[in-house]
Amino acid sequence: MRVPNLMTDGQMTDSPRAIRLGTRRSKLATTQSQIVADQLTALTGTPVELVLITTEGDANTSDSLASLGGTGVFVSAVRDELLAGNIDFAVHSLKDLPTEPHPGVEICAIPKREDAHDALCASDGKTLQDLPLGAVVGTGSPRRRAQLQAIRPDLKLVDLRGNIDTRLTKVTQDQLDAVVLASAGLNRIGFSEAITELLDFDLMLPAPGQGALAIESRSTLQDESPALAQALSQLDDQHTRLAVTAERALLRELEAGCSAPVGAFSQIADTASDKSGVTLELSGVVAGEDGTRVIRESISGAAADAQALGIELARKMLALGASELMTEMK
């Protein structure tokens, strides 16, 4: 389907203005936003302009995400521009989005997910088990730290912020033995060759929503530009949406932010065309700071009940002491 003249600013013209897509300034953010922009242009024939926005998380790269508040540090400034009408829609890494609804904003599409694994990028092609005793590994994620400590309590883990290039350089310059990053980000910017091991989900569960993108628009977009709203909806992948709905429901029920030591991954187990017959499998983990206590549970059920499955699994984990483990990390 091609949708002509999506954005005309109310003027009587056959030449639409470019659709304005708001994004963070990082190489990864602009790359993944350009992927969405190209898909939308191919669908509609209308040009898409990237509008670069500096967020709190981008402006402050010296402090840990937890100290900045974690939730929303990569999102708030973009949402402000969206609500002000300075952009038409925004693209985020879904794992950065707070689980609480934001007034005036909605997720209008979730494209097909990239690889959700965490990836080890180590010197000399080493795997996690190959790393020497006391190896120094960089990560800015409490979730990764906790799970790494559970697997390899001997590792020395150091807090690490910055773009992907900066983090990888610390390995190539022998400042660190390894870093752990999201496979999806490495794949999107063409750095897949830096991966020395994809960490199996049995070892490390990713952040809820990792590998997925969220396309956000104003809640009024359907009234403002029904053609654009319809075009964006065509970028939505139903299976990805169901999976991340379960993961984010778990995170929200745990009352944990995106910087909490919570991992989750959900996937479709049955690809029946009728949604009511599709089965969803969901696994979740909460780990204490030193990795000595780990609560990991799984559940499966009808994909149509994705949100309820996430809530049910979270309550099961809370009953096992998940809240106490998350408190340790604060």
Image (tube, grey):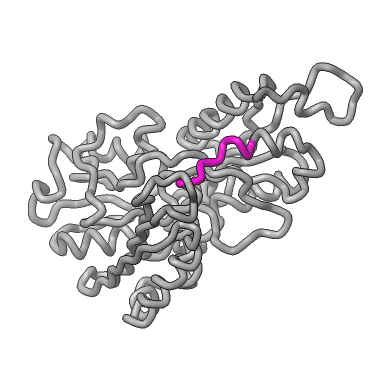
Residue 142 in sight in this render: no
Q: Quadrant of residue 228?
A: top right
Up the image or down, 40 lies above or below 260; here it is above
Residue occupying image coordinates x 20% and y 42%: 197
Total marks shown come to: 0
Residue 25 in sight in this render: yes
For the magenta stretch, what is the residue range? Answer: 232-239
73 vs 312, left or right, is right
Relative image position of residue 19 (x, y in whole percent): 70, 29
Image quadrant containing the N terminus: top right
Relative image position of residue 199 (x, y in whole percent): 23, 48
Image quadrant containing the C terminus: bottom left
Residue occupying image coordinates x 67% and y 23%: 2
297 vs 302, left or right, is left
- Residue that extends furthest to the top in the rendered view of this protein: 14
Relative image position of residue 261 (x, y in whole percent): 36, 65
Residue occupying image coordinates x 44% and y 66%: 310
Name the residue nearer the viewer: 68 or 300: 300
166 vs 49, left or right, is left
In reply to whether residue 306 is colored magenta, the answer given is: no
Relative image position of residue 87 (x, y in whole percent): 71, 38
- Residue that extends furthest to the right in the rendered view of this protein: 12
